[in-house]
Amino acid sequence: MKRIIVTVLGVALVLTATTGVFAQTALTGFTGKGFKVGLNLANITGGDAPDETSMRMGFAGGGWITYAFSDLFAVQPELFYTMKGYKYDFTDPITQQTETYTFKADYIEVPVLARVSLSGASNFKPNFYAGPSIAFLLSAKNGDTDVKEYMKSTDFGLIGGVGADYLLGTGKITFDVRYNVGLTSTDDSGNDSDVKNSAITFLVGYGF
């Protein structure tokens, strides 16, 4: 997690150095809304996570609103559907055949992000953001087996990322890359296992 935070901060510093001064025109209140869709590369972390897992590729998408306190700083609540989980290989001890299984955990996620915008070209505005999120479990399957009852119904995480807005007429096209790290274990089987969600997400959207 520390490496991810350092990376995000490093990218933010590079953006600051290469995009010049902050925008000068004050813009406050509800300044935007829109939707984003993209790709989730999900996996798990934690002391009790299996040694060898691979990412589950899934969908992420939803909407957001932005409330700006200045041309520099804003708060951005979001509402997303996001597919998490992981893949793993299982070798049958009798047949010695190996199969790949997918652990699927799908959520409705509500991030609340603090966003800092920078000035770039007249129609290109980079930004970086971070904040907490809460997610509500919709379904969970290990292969074809329903395991929702063995997972916690809510999941808490921390999101950090970088993005950019490309102004286009009265709207804007948005791009961002974010990392979501779970802060609490998802296990609710009674074993107190330390297993947390994580995901790298690539998003593109439209704001108006």
Image (cartoon, helix red, strand yellow):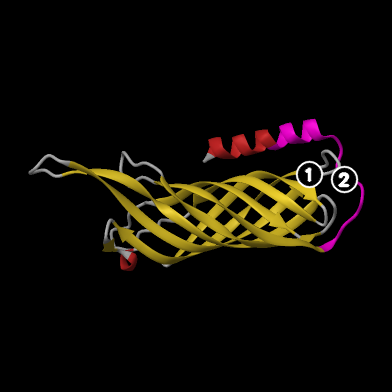
Q: Which mark is residue 90?
A: none
Q: Secondary structure at mark 2?
A: loop
What's the distance in space between the residues labelled 2 and 1, CA to CA? Answer: 9 Å
Amino acid type, callout 1: Lys
Residue 27: name its quadrant: bottom right
Name the residue nearer the viewer: 139 or 133.
139
The x, y position of residue 31, in whole percent, is: 80, 61
Q: Is residue 20 above or below residue 146?
A: above
Is 19 magenta? The answer is: yes
Is 84 magenta? The answer is: no
Is disc 2 surrounded by few (<14), some (14 to 19) or many (20+) residues within 10 Å?
Answer: some
The x, y position of residue 2, in whole percent, is: 54, 38
The x, y position of residue 5, in whole percent, is: 59, 40
Q: Which residue is mark 2?
A: 23
Say which residue appears at 90% left-offset and 54% top-offset.
26
Name the residue nearer the viewer: 139 or 70.
139
Circles 2, 1 touching at the beta carbon (< 8 Å): yes
Q: Which residue is mark 1?
A: 125
Say which residue appears at 84% left-offset and 38% top-offset.
121
Say which residue appears at 74% left-offset and 35% top-offset.
15
Provide the residue span drawn in magenta: 12-29
Name the residue nearer the viewer: 176 or 137.
176
Quadrant where the C terminus lies?
bottom right
Amino acid type, callout 2: Ala
Q: Earlier in the sequence, mark 2 or mark 1?
A: 2
Which residue is the extreme one toward the front? 169
Residue 35: name its quadrant: bottom right
Question: Does 75 sit left or right of 103 as displayed?
Answer: right
Name the residue nearer the viewer: 65 or 6.
65
